[in-house]
Image: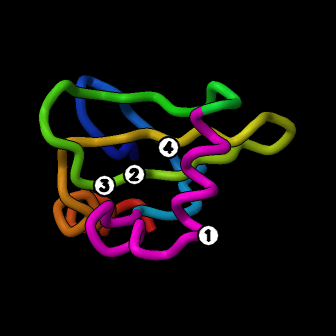
């Protein structure tokens, strides 16, 4: 089973978390994390539309990736119910 997170991007079960950009970026730690991920080239933007969430993915033995999605965290969570 795969989770469609936007722009034909499919993730399997390597999802660490799905985060709402409006509420999670209130925290300085989260903003610092996203800024560092961007500097390290780990950010993958899936759409030119207004970003609503980010998804943290980490595969064993590989670097983590941060996907910026136009879908809300609630929408992605609903889609993921069959995965977990």
Residue at image x 55%, y 49%?
A: 34
Q: Which mark is first along the chain, 4 or 1? A: 4
Q: Are marks 1 and 4 in contact (CB under 8 Å)?
A: no
Q: Residue furthest front?
A: 28
Real-space Cα separation, disc 2 to disc 1, in angstroms: 15 Å
Left or right: 70 in relation to 24: left
| Residue ID for mark 3 | 53
Please say if 53 is above or below 66.
Answer: below
Left or right: 27 in relation to 18: right
Q: Are marks 4 and 3 in contact (CB under 8 Å)?
A: no
Counting from the top left corner in percent of width and height, residue 46 is at 31, 28
Q: Which mark is first along the chain, 1 or 3? A: 1
Q: Main secondary structure of the magenta part?
A: helix
Q: Are marks 3 and 2 in contact (CB under 8 Å)?
A: yes
Residue at disc 4, secondary structure: loop
| Residue ID for mark 1 | 29
Magenta-highlighted residues:
19-38
Please say if 26 is above or below 67.
Answer: below
Left or right: 26 in relation to 48: right
Counting from the top left corner in percent of width and height, residue 7 is at 24, 25
Residue at image x 63%, y 55%?
A: 33
Real-space Cα separation, disc 2 to disc 4, in angstroms: 15 Å
Q: Nearer the viewer, mark 1 or mark 4?
A: 1
Residue at disc 1, secondary structure: helix
| Residue ID for mark 4 | 12
Real-space Cα separation, disc 3 to disc 1, in angstroms: 16 Å
* The C terminus, quarter of image: bottom left
Give the class, few, some or many, for how many residues have Cα within 10 Å of label 3's Cα (few <14, many ≥20).
Answer: many
Residue at image x 22%, y 27%?
A: 47
- Asked which quadrant contains residue 49, the reply is top left
Counting from the top left corner in percent of width and height, residue 30 is at 55, 65
């Amino acid at each position: 089973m795969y989770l469609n997170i936007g722009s034909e991007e499919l993730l399997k079960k390597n999802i660490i978390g799905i985060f709402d950009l409006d509420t999670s970026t209130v925290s300085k730690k989260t903003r610092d994390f996203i800024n560092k991920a961007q500097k390290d080239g780990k950010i993958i933007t899936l759409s030119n539309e207004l970003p609503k969430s980010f998804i943290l993915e980490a595969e064993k033995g590989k670097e983590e990736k941060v996907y910026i999605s136009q879908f809300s965290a609630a929408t992605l969570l609903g889609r993921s119910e069959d995965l977990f």
